[in-house]
Structures are given as C-alpha cells and as structure tokens.
Image (cartoon, helix red, strand yellow):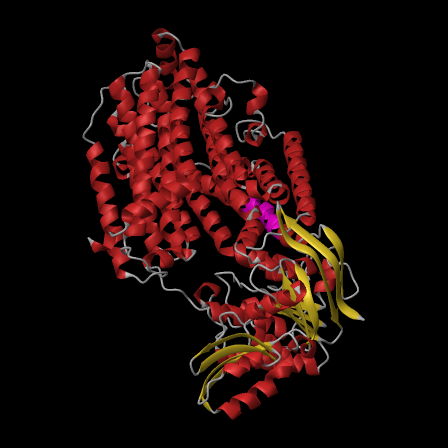
Amino acid sequence: MAAIEIDGLVKRFGHATALDGLSLAVADGAVHGFLGPNGAGKSTTLRVLLGLLTADAGTVRLLGGDPWRDAVALHRRLAYVPGDVNLWPNLSGGEIIDVLGGLRGGLDERRRAELVDRFGLDPTKKGRAYSKGNRQKVALIAALACDVELYLFDEPTTGLDPLMEAAFQECVRELRAAGRTVLLSSHILAEVEALCDQVSIVRDGRVVDGGSLDDLRHLRRTTIVAETTAAPDDLVALPGVHDAHVDGHRVRLSVDAPALEAVMRRLAALGVRTLESRPPTLEELFLRHYDEAAA
Amino acid sequence: MSDLAGTRPLLGLALRRDRLVVVLSALGIAALLVVTALSYQGLYPTQADRARAALAITDNAALIAVAGPPRALDSIGGLTAWKSGLWAAMAMALVCALLAVRHTRGEEERGQTELLLSTATGRLAPTAAGLTLVALLNVAAAVLTALGLIAVGTDAAGAVALALWIAGAGLVFGALGALAGQLVSTARAANGLAAATIGVAFALRALGDTGGGALTWLSPLGWGEELHAFAGERWAPLSLYAIATPLVLLATRALRRRRDLGSGIVAARRGPARAAAGLPRPLGLALRLQRASLIGWTLGLLVAGIGFGAVTKSVDDLARGGEGKLGQVVLRGHAADPRDAFVATLATLLALIASGFAVQSALRPHGDETTGRAEPLLSTALGRRGWAGSHLALAFAGTALVLLATGIGLGVGDVLAGRGLDDLARDAGAALAHAPAVWVLAGLATLLLGAAPRAVGLAWGAIVACYVVFVVGPILDVPGWVLDLSPFQHVPLLPAADLDVVPLLWLTAIALALSAAGLAALARRDVATG
C-alpha cells in the first residue's frame, strides 16, 4: 500500500499556479526524497498533504484517508517539521516540544530525553531566544520523539551545523530500520542521496522524474577538471563526454556515469598532473534532464 | 551624530509603510472635532441657547471628570473643545504611542532592525525615524484640525490652542511609547505599558479637575486643558510639552545606547524544561499563551476602575440634578442620581477599552498564521475549530473577567470614597452588563478571521467606530439605526437604569452566531503559512 498517493494535483494562488498536475506516490516504509529547487512547489505539496491548503484539482490520499476531511485523525499518525520554524516567543523550547508532541497524541519520554541530549538542545530557553538552528532542533525533536507511521520533513536541516545534520541523518536511518515512512523534501542532492531509496524530482509544480536512486544516477554527469602531461584533445571525442573545453594541457568536461571508467583510463594514459571531480549540482541535474527531454 | 546616520531613508521607508495610517489618523482626529463643532451649530445655533445649556452643567463634577472643566461654553468652539478635545487628545496619544512602539520595539522584535543596522545605519536611526513619523502625524493632525475648525467659523486662536493640545499630547505619548519600547522586550508589553500610562494621565486630570486642580498639572492630557482654548488662551502651558518631550527622548536615547539589540532593561528569563500537565491541550495552550495578556488587562482595568471610582465622591458631593440636555450628551442615560449616570458612562468607556482585549484575544489564531506558527500546530491532531475555538473561548471568558475586575475597581474606588459595600456589587454589575456587547466585537473579529482574513483590521476599526458613537453619537445628525449598529447602544445603563436582559440575550446570540459563522468559514479556507 502507498502511504501517499497524489494524482494530478493542481493548486493556484490567484493567477499563480503553484502545483500544475503534480503526481507522487510514496510507498509504505520507504524513505522518499522530494527534490527540487526553491519555489518548485515542495512546501505547497506538503501543506496540501497536511490539509492546510485545499486542492483545486486532482486526488490526494494520505495514509488511506482524505487529508482535508480527515485532517485531525490523520495527524495523529504523522509528524511534520516545517522548513521555516517559528516558535511562541514566551514558551520555552521544552514546553513547545511537549505541546506539539502532546497535541499529536503523546510522545515517547525516553526518546524525547535521548533526542534533547543528542541534538544538544537547552530546553529551558524561551522561544524568542533560540537561533534559527535551535528553533529547527525544537521542531525536529518534537517530531522525532513521536512514534508515528509517517514523517514529513520540509528542508529539515536548514540552519543546522554539520554535526547536527549528521545526527538528523542518523535519526532518519533509525526510522527506516523501524519500517517508518519518510517524505524528505530538500534541495540538497547530497542529503537526499545519503538517505533516500526513492526520489521524485519536482520542477515548476510537477514531478518531472522519479524512481530509485540508481535510476536517477543514469542522469548524473560528473564534472572533471584536469591538467595532463600530454595534450588531452582526443578526450573530447570519447562517447559519453559532454561540454568539453580544452585549453592547452587543461581540460574541463562533463561525463555520463557509464562512460566514467573509459574517461579515467584515457586520462591516466595521458598522465594526470592535477585532477578535480565533482558531482553535478541539482541545477545541472535538471538541465541534463531537460536536455534529454528535448532530444 | 553617527548614531543617527541613515535616519532620512528610514523615514522614507516608515512613511511608505504607514502613509495610510498617518493620513487616516490625522483626518480622523480633525474630522472628530469638526463634526462636533458642526453638530453643536445645529443643536445650539444662538448664543442664548448655548448659555442656557452651559448653565446646566457648569457645576456637574461627573461631566467635568469625563470631559474636563467647562470653559466658554457659550461659544461653539468652547463647546467643541470641552466635548471632544480631551477625547481627541487621548485618541491621538494612543495612536502615537502605538505607532512609536511599532517602529521601535516592534521592528526589533521581528528582526527588521537587525537587518537595517547591518547597513550603514546608526543605532538610533530606526527610533529617530519612527519618532519623526509620529511628529509628522502630529503636525498634519494639528494643521488639519486648526484649519478645519477655523473653516467652520470658530475663533482662530482657540482653534490653534485646541490643535496644539492634541499635537502636544501626541508628541509626549509618542515619546513615552518609544521609551516603553526600551524598557520591555516585546512590542505587546510596550503597548500595554504605554496604554496604562495614558490611563493614569486621564485619571490624574480627572482627579485634578474635580479636586484642587494640582493633579491636572501632573498629566500631559491635562496640560492642554490649561491652555483654555476659546476662553482667553494661555500659551505658557505649551512649554510643558516642549520640555517634557525632549526629556523623554533623552531618556529613550540613553537607554537605547546602553542596551543590546533585542534586549530590554528587564532581562529575559528562562522557562521550564517540561510543559505542565494541562499545556498540551488546546485550551491549556491558549490559556498559557494568553495568560500574561489576560493578567495585564485585568490588573490595568482594575486600577483604572479604582481611579475612576474614586472620582465619584466629588460627583456625590455636588448638588443633585442640574443635568440639562447637554448633560445627557456627555453622560449616558437619565438618572436621578448623577453619580449613577457617571458610573454607567465610565463602565461603557472602560468596556470599550476592554474590547481591545477581546479582539486581540479572538485574533490570536491570525497571529499564529502570519508568523507561521499555525503550520506546525495544525499538523498535529489539533483541529481548526479547537485551535481558534480555544482562543475564542478565552476571549469570551476573559472579557467577563476583565469587566468584572473593572467593576470591582469602580466599586472599590467608590468604597474608598466612603460609599457603602452594596455600591460595589452595583458597580460590578454595571461593568459586567457590557460583556455581551464586547462579545459581539470578538464575534465580529472571528468572522473576519474565518471569512476575510486580510481584513481582520476592521475589527479594530469597529472598536473605533463604537468609540466615536460613544463620544459624539448623541449629537450627530444621523439616523438612529446607524448609531444602533454599535452594540454598546443596547446595553442597559446600570446602575442608573433597570436591568433589562432581553437586549443582553440578543447581543449574546449575535456574538455566538458571528463566532460560529467565523469558525465554520475558517474550517473551509486555506491556512496562511507565514
């Protein structure tokens, strides 16, 4: 059974169309990445799933129910962390965790204490005194301390330092091991790669690609910048190489994942003086995707 | 002067944001006075009419306590200054204080000041820009008022004196608003502090005007009375405004220079690491969030009630009767006992102030929406009715509590002034009888919250409209049904009148119907997510 089933979802704000026929399926027990640039419609989709916004068209099923009609009943079975966390200025972090947890139907005491410790949160500070990262931690602890079927995270690591980001990733792995469903919205490819089995890429209000990470990898191109002993001119002609620029002994090119091995062998034969390689940015991934769609 | 660098562009920004507020406030104040003058021209066209009316109230301490000492009531200008001058000055003081807080502590709380101060902007520039905006508002209001009054034929010197009274009060309380913003670390607390100061100033001059007069000189609202507008103007008291405003500004500057951005003079406290047992429930959370505000309003109106209640003694001391038609237009209702009419009037005034609590409280969910806090809250098993309904329930119950405190305050003041204990119960009843009228405003706020969330400001406009009906309604030449739109027109004027429960039941029914419609609409619309 699918935890989330969205088909042809349309949401308009006045004349602006935020979601333009978005379809998404998240399998039970999957950790699903929801990947897209800012303004692609990720948060709007989550808010429709939470019954905060009405759908203008399309069908949306959440945990077998209607997210608008059955909002309260469904919310007992899920936990959500918004992308931009605002806290009540005069409530302490500890109180807010208890309030949100309690309103969801109760939280696991042992887990709560463990999470406060793990994220290094001072729960006695008032909401107005927390930094952005600490506000995020309050919302994360309140969500993770609840034992529910589905976790919705909207860019949850914004403002967290790398140590806390690692702590969050650890928590998600534990959720996966326990068989929970997670929908992780993010614009950080590395985060999604590290955590998710399935990925949906959203752009301009619709899902433009999706599938397992392996499926996605065929779309990936690695960018290589190298300086070689022999002139690297013949690299350009290798299959799977794109956007190559040769400048004397320096070369800069993008290469499809399957062709990577051949390119590396050739580079080694040319004699490598310096080598830099980096994964594609999300934007490059999209460009690549659209290149293919256009072809 | 580097502390003030960038004030001019910030002023431009402030004007851009609040041009509508400034223009409407200036026009509103001027219109209140011009309409008052025009109404009196219709009511008492000849000097003989006015002299007869004036005779009836010259010695009435109750009228003096709520409107100030009558001077030159045989002229249209004198009548206008007496009837609406103090109320206009008080409204101006409130607008200026709120505007100053909004542009100082309010911006700081929302993090806008941090962004501004990271540019080449001096530390005092945001405060200076906000206060310059307040000054511009006062200049505009004073010019419009003076020109408006002169245009309808009142004496020019008097019109100028009255205009300067209003602008002087606006400037002093604008500066006091900025000072309050330095003392406490939230805009809400600063607003409360400033409003309480205005209440104290009103009570001080009420005591002064009905007593020896010395206390009037302690109240910035009273200084303007001493200008004797339209009654042989004295200009020397203007120097009090000219001295007090810079002094308050200097104190504000000193405090601002000494403190960190975001902090108040009172240090932020820590909170409990765990929530109390009842907190994670809708009503428990609403109560916790509204607790400080509820305590503040209750204590504030209790103290205001005691202050006003104490004045009733001087009303009592004076000869009974003597209320002509003019008396009725200041005091509400006919009464054998002028003290009773006075209590009824005060109860309505204080209930109008308490409406601020009711609307603020009912609009809490709107605040949750605009700050993005509604999103995490409504992603829990908390439904929308439970969310907004809890705040609304507190608005209703809190209104009753605040009004009860008001009435007890009036009664305690009465008892302190030597009346019997049974008066305490009568005064409490007089205040509590206003609860259904205040509930109607809370219901209206809820309806707007649900059906027209962009227009929730109209709920505050409704309070202002009721205030205008309260101040000048009886002398306005408008159909009765227009005035009857104010729920306060239907409250039986206890203790002067008999308790008639029928209108109270109607008002309660209307309040509940508005609330139910609002909650139903809220359940059907998109939630704003910050």
Stretch in magenta:
B390-401
Instruction: Determine the image quadrant of residue A108.
Output: bottom right
In this rendering, position of residue B407 left or right of residue B30:
right
Is residue B229 at least partly visible in the picture? no
Point 63% across, 29% down: residue: B500
Above or below, B20 against A274 in this view is above
Front residue (pair B473, B97): B97
Point 54% across, 79% down: residue: A236
Front residue (pair B283, B114): B114
Point 40% across, 33% down: residue: B23
In the rendered image, residue B295 lying in the magenta stretch gets the answer: no
In this rendering, position of residue B31 left or right of residue A262:
left
Q: Residue B513, how many percent across, how many down?
A: 68, 38
Point 30% across, 17% down: residue: B72
Q: Residue B297, how many percent across, how many down?
A: 47, 48
The C terminus of chain B is located in which quarter?
bottom right
Q: Residue A190, how many percent across, how many down?
A: 57, 77
Front residue (pair A72, A81): A81
In the rendered image, residue B391 lying in the magenta stretch gets the answer: yes
Q: Residue B233, how many percent across, how many down?
A: 22, 22
Above or below, A128 against B513 in this view is below
Above or below, B367 against A64 in this view is above
In this rendering, position of residue B156 left or right of residue B48:
left
